[in-house]
Amino acid sequence: MNAKIRNLALGFLFFTTSTALHPQGIGKTFKPVFTEDGLIVAAAVATDAPWNADPTGKSDASVAIQQALEAVRKAGGGTLFLPAGRYRIEKSIQMPATVTLCGEWRPPMPGQPLSGTILLALAEKGNENGPALLSAPKLGHAYLWGLTIYNPEQRPDAPVPYPYAIEGRVAYVRNITLVNSWQGVPMSRLPSGAIA
């Protein structure tokens, strides 16, 4: 069975099973999302209503993403999917425990523009001791998967300090690309976790 047919079958199975068991509410009806990497079963999609995170990079998406993350947490946890696009992040985002923020990661290619899910890191410019762009909870663990974090205003001839890109109790970090980051991930301060 080829991968696309398998993913469609799995998506249909997850969607119909979860809808039959829990016909209403976030975290109760799972939304299958098909990406180039496979099937993601999301509790919510940040670009959908009521959050409507802007994937064009023209307006700040940090509040919409934060609200969507909190909605997933309140529903008992799960995955918040952030589709491919450019998300302007002007405020630090607090990752709740039991929630995965999952995007569509694309490896950077020489001579090609960045693609996939890109967080435009603009929060706390000039403040290297400020809150991280993505801060994980003090209790429990958060999960990050499939994101590119890009500081678009960083210049090699006049670098500007920024806080860490990711900090806190992140149990799992997979397929994360940091571009122009002043500070990446403080590994020596993490109690546990995995980077893949």
Image: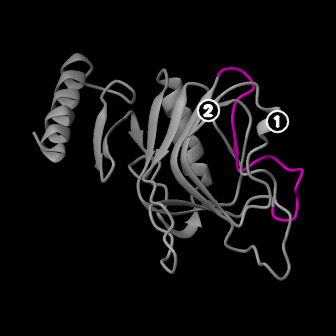
Label 2: element kind: strand
- Residue 143 in picture, x, y percent from top left: 56, 34
The stretch of residues the image draws in magenta is 125-140
> Which residue is disc 2 drawn over?
194
Tell which of 107 and 95 is nearer to you: 107
Residue type indicated by callout 1 = Ser
Residue type indicated by callout 2 = Ala
- Residue 45 in picture, x, y percent from top left: 40, 45
Residue 172 drawn above or below residue 46: above
Discs 1, 2 touching: Cβ within 8 Å: no
Q: Is residue 136 magenta?
A: yes
Image quadrant where one finds the C terminus: top right
Q: Residue at x 61, y 53 (%)?
A: 62
Looking at the image, is mark 1 or mark 2 earlier in the sequence?
Answer: 1
Residue 39 drawn above or below residue 150: above
Dominant secondary structure of the residues highlighted in magenta in the image:
loop
Residue 51 drawn above or below residue 168: below
- Residue 4 in picture, x, y percent from top left: 17, 47
Image quadrant where one finds the N terminus: top left
Q: Residue at x 69, y 60 (%)?
A: 90
Label 1: element kind: helix
> Which residue is disc 1 drawn over?
188
Q: CA distance from mark 1 to mark 2?
A: 13 Å
